[in-house]
Image (tube, coloured by chain):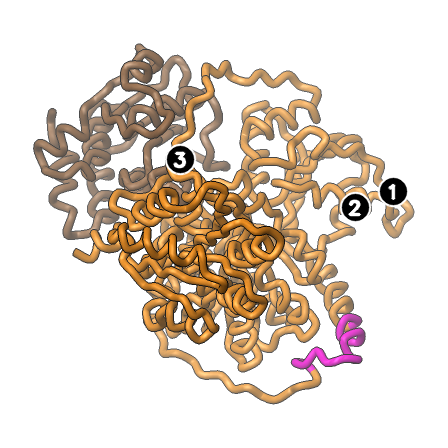
Chain colours: A orange, B brown
Amino acid sequence: MKKILLGDEAIVQGALEAGVDFVTGYPGCPSAEIGEEFLKLGEKYGVYAEWSINEKIALESAVGASFSGLKSLVNMKSFGINVCADSLLPLAYTGTNAPMVIVVADDPSNHSSAQSEQDSRQYAFLSHIPMLEPSSPKECYTFTKLAFKISEKFKLPVILRITTRVAHQRMPVDIKEVKERKKQMGEFIKNPDQYSTLMPKTLEMKKELLKKIEKIKLFAETSEINVAEGKSSKLGIIASGVSYLYIKEALDILGLDLPILKLGFFYPLPEMKISRFLNGLEKVLVLEEIEGLLEKEIFKIMGKPLPDGRQAKAEILGKNLLSEIGEMDIEKTCHALAKLANRQYKKPIIKEKALPIRTPRLCEGCPYWYAFATIKKVAPKGTIFGGDIGCNMMAGLNPHNIQDYLFSMGSSLGISHGVKKSTNQKVISIIGDGTFFHSGIPALINSVYNKSNQLIMVLDNRITAMTGHQNNPGEILEIEEIARACGVKNIKVLDPINMKELEETIKDYLNKEETTMIVCKRICALLAKRSK
Amino acid sequence: MNKNFNIIISGVGGHGIITLIKIIDEAAFIDGYDVKSSELHGLAQRGGSVLAHIKFGKKIYSPLVSDGSADLVIATELMEGLRTLKFLNSKTQFLVNKNLLPFIGGLSEEKIMQQLPKKNIQIVEASKICIEKFGKEAVSTIYLLGLVIRNNLIPLKQESVLKAIEKIVPDKYLDLNIKAFNSHD
């Protein structure tokens, strides 16, 4: 049965067919559709699904499920893997019981991301966790099923690394029907020898892990997702992820037929297969998005001779032609291919002028308009504004321009604490409700405990809005009660449309000796419109 | 159809571009073509630019339309239409909704109109017509799709597109969407 699926939906389909029981994650672009689909379909197909409050807890919950014998999937955007890294590394040591797949969605070109243009493939090296890279929805579907199989066989989690152009690509995919079923219950069978990373056995565990990786390397050597195709030649191409689609098209455009080694595995790499492919080639073009990681590995592999003594000596083209900044596309690929094949590639004449950018803006009626305007009006000259992730990052854009730093989820409180302790300046941190729950609370406690008198403005629009209105603990917990329990004495809850009250409170709180908090509570305007 | 057919859709978040992609994808699939598309979500919801690519034909590899190779461009807003010029060639058909959503630092309608191509272009007041006729600007995207089909700007069968609309559009909005699709103005 063929159905048009988004890359994210294809992952859901693959996981359902693989019999996934337990799904956790944190919403972000471009992976949010995965969790959304599971929340919609979970009931029908017996899958427990949740939005966890952050990616670390999402991963840890899945670890609990895996230890209890349930098949799990964790979904997050690129930066999520940073948040869960602290538990990701020990997970490689303990390994899984029931299979686990971790989906990480990078956003080359930062179409929908602040922070950094992160290449999460580095985590495969850091954690020694196998990583697969699909190029299309069809591969999202087949690789997800394969990832569960690999995880089951080798008792390690498998990371499925996707990018925006894969996650948000649509195409017809041949899928199987999934039968409805009831939720499964597992059983935790005690096994502290495996599940506790207590010293001194961590080094033994590391040894076991590296042995597993050697075995997976052998598996990768014969895996059909690492495949060589095309006519033999003195020139060759090695491609991963969506770059494979661009090179297929570029070969058509330039009328060339050259051998391609498509790597579905990023880690561990099938070194022998790569070595054999390289053998006899004079020049090879390595195509990958963002960093030149494959390229570096290929250099290393070239340094090792094949068992029969032959040694590859190809010239490698890669990041010397292609930027490490921004996503790949057909033009860049054609340009690199033309260099490889010594062909002329005429770019079509482009009559494009630099146009003013339409930056995102607050929606009509958004409660943040009131809050931003009031903060801007009333804060004394020289006040420092801490920015945070979510809709409130628009504080940094016109016409507001009240953002002096922007890092990662929840970071405004921590950085503001440091500024406050280092200067005599007034500091206001601006954070949304979802972000506060995600990682604002430890920073709040730190601010109270270590005594900095920053003003924290929580813009509570009752939902995680930016990523498409996912519910958050604000459904049952009030931020002001959490803050009170954390020791904040000066807390004001108000509706930001009462600008006079907000104005006076800001003025008052900026002169307090302790951490203060104003919770601006008003529902997201889009949500209010929809629920009418 | 010998060559693949390449479409660029450009607009602003909230214009129903994702729905339009799904409909065209589905109709191409019904007509037996291989099809791929690419879209950007996320910040697009907050009134940012949205640029989507659709390709269908015998065999499609990448979902992206390369520069200068669009056969059809649909823009749901004037300024966003101006952003698609790099995809045009001398034969590209260009359909633009005469609708301007201004922003700080943006260009005036007059400036945009001067820079839009003069050939193979239709500038239609889709938003205005849809507000007047149906009381809903949201259907202007489907109205544009109706024009595309009636003017033979896309090699897809009308009945396939209608089937796709029935499949993709939720029941409660279906009647209105079909009316907008069939509207002759």
Secondary element under disc 2, as helix, strand or loop, is helix
Q: Alpha-carbon neighbours of circle 1 within 10 Å: few (<14), some, or many (≥20)?
A: some
**In terms of image quadrants, where is residue A356?**
top left
Residue A370 shows up from this direction: yes
The magenta segment is A194-207
Q: Are marks 2 and 3 on the same chain?
A: yes
Residue lying furthest left: B133
Marks 2/3: CA distance? 53 Å
Tell me the SS state at disc 1.
Answer: loop
- Residue ID for mark 1: A311
Residue beneath label 3, please? A398
Q: Choose mark 2 or mark 3, whichever is in front.
A: 3
Q: Position of residue A490 (x, y in %)?
A: 40, 66
Q: Which one is in front, A55 or A223?
A: A55
Q: In the picture shown, does residue A170 fall above or below A252?
A: below
- Please give the label number shown on residue A466: none
**Mark pair 3, 1: CA separation:** 58 Å
Task: Say left or right for A495 vs A258.
Answer: left
Measured along the vertical axis of the image, is residue A151 above or below residue A165? below
In depth, the one of A351 and B160 nearer the eye is: A351
Which residue carries the number 2 mark? Answer: A275
Chain on which label 1 sits: A
